Image: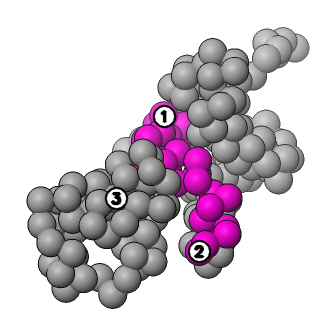
Amino acid sequence: MEKNLYLKTLKLIGNKGIRFTTEDLAKELGTSKRTIYAHFASKHEIIEKTIDFVFSEIVASDNEIMERNELTLREKMILSFQNIPDAYSVSSIVRHMEDLQRHYPDLWEKTNNHLNTIWDPVMHLIEQGIKNEELEVIDTVILKLMLNETLKKLLDYDFLANHQVSFESGIKAMNNIILYGLIKRNDD
């Protein structure tokens, strides 16, 4: 029931923002508000658990890649950059960050923390690659800033519409720039 509830909650947040009601959710689930409140104390808890669900799926997927010892650093990096979160799930929440900040400031902060740490496994991998001299020495603080801000922009529907870019094509372009760079290096 819980996974379905989280998916339905994401759908409602995507359509109505955080102003959806538990009655709306009960209709989506084909159940009663009483049944929902048997599992959750409040709408706040429903939203919080939904946020946790979305980001825990991302973390679990990242951990699965990092724990695969048969993969090289290069393979792990490529898979990690391809392991971008489902745009709909994350953008349903991010799109309503102002309302979240206004009505549920603790959940706004929690979402921001998740977004700011989403690249941590990749950054750890990059730092390991730099230390092992498998990667170029770069400023990882700036790289993480670039990744965070690009992800946030690519989760913004207005930005995508104004620039006629899809989330998927934007992520692919970012991945190519980060992984393969702009200028070809000479071997001399």
**Position of 159 relative to 89 (above/below):** above
As measured in the structure, the alpha-carbon distance from the residue carrying label 3 to the one carrying label 2 is 16 Å
Can you say which quadrant of the picture contains the C terminus?
Answer: top right
Q: How is the image coloured?
A: one colour
**Which residue is identified by label 1?**
82
> Which residue is located at x 48 percent, y 34 percent?
82
> Which residue is located at x 52 percent, y 45 percent?
91
Say whether residue 21 is magenta. Answer: no
**Which residue is identified by label 3?**
9
The residues colored magenta run: 76-104
Q: Position of residue 158 (x, y in %)?
A: 65, 31
Q: Is residue 77 left or right of residue 3?
A: right
> Observer-nearest residue: 4 or 62?
4
Q: Position of residue 94 (x, y in %)?
A: 58, 51
Q: Is residue 80 left or right of residue 139?
A: left
Can you say which quadrant of the picture contains the N terminus?
Answer: bottom left
SS at mark 1 in the image: helix
In terms of sequence position, does the residue under pointer 3 or pointer 2 come before the other?
A: 3
**Which residue is identified by label 2?**
104
